[in-house]
Amino acid sequence: MDEKMLNKYSDIENCPIRNVLNHIGNKWSMLVLSILDEEGLLRFNEIHKAIGSISQKMLSTTLKRLESDGLVKRKVHPVIPPRVEYELTKRGKSLIPHIKNLVGWAVENFNDIKDSRLKFERLS
């Protein structure tokens, strides 16, 4: 492998694959983005309820990461208690077709992948 190839992928700050996909490719981000795409504007507790198995801390962290990447917009309404809502930004909406393609691929190949995993485990 040449030096250019090593530098291309080894520097996390300058490698789009490692840097960007680290934020959106984790366990929860694509699910949050998909829910916001389907439902539109949602409050924190509505997102939490929709997912169910995510802790409030992890959901908060996920939303902050998505917000920092400009994929999700957070709006705080000045009422007591404060009402906070989340929605996709234009950039977030531009990501949705790619997520849908990946989800479609996963659904289409899910049973075969499960079978492959079982075969692999039996051979291991």
Image (cartoon, rainbow, N blue to C red):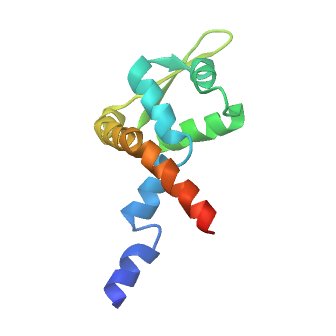
Q: Position of residue 46 (x, y in %)?
A: 58, 18
Residue in view at x 62 percent, y 24 percent: 48
Q: Position of residue 4 (x, y in %)?
A: 32, 85
Q: Position of residue 59 (x, y in %)?
A: 62, 34
Image quadrant in which the C terminus is located: bottom right
Is residue 110 in sight in this rendering? Answer: yes
Residue in view at x 42 percent, y 55 percent: 20
Q: Is residue 9 left or right of residue 122?
A: left
Q: Nearer the viewer, residue 27 or 110?
A: 110
Q: Nearer the viewer, residue 17 or 78?
A: 17
Residue in view at x 60 percent, y 22 percent: 44
Please tell me in which quadrant of the rendered image residue 87 appears: top left
Image quadrant in which the N terminus is located: bottom left
Q: Nearer the viewer, residue 96 or 111?
A: 111
- Position above or below: 11 against 94: below
Is residue 40 in sight in this rendering? Answer: no
- Position above or below: 109 against 48: below
Please tell me in which quadrant of the rendered image residue 109 appears: top left
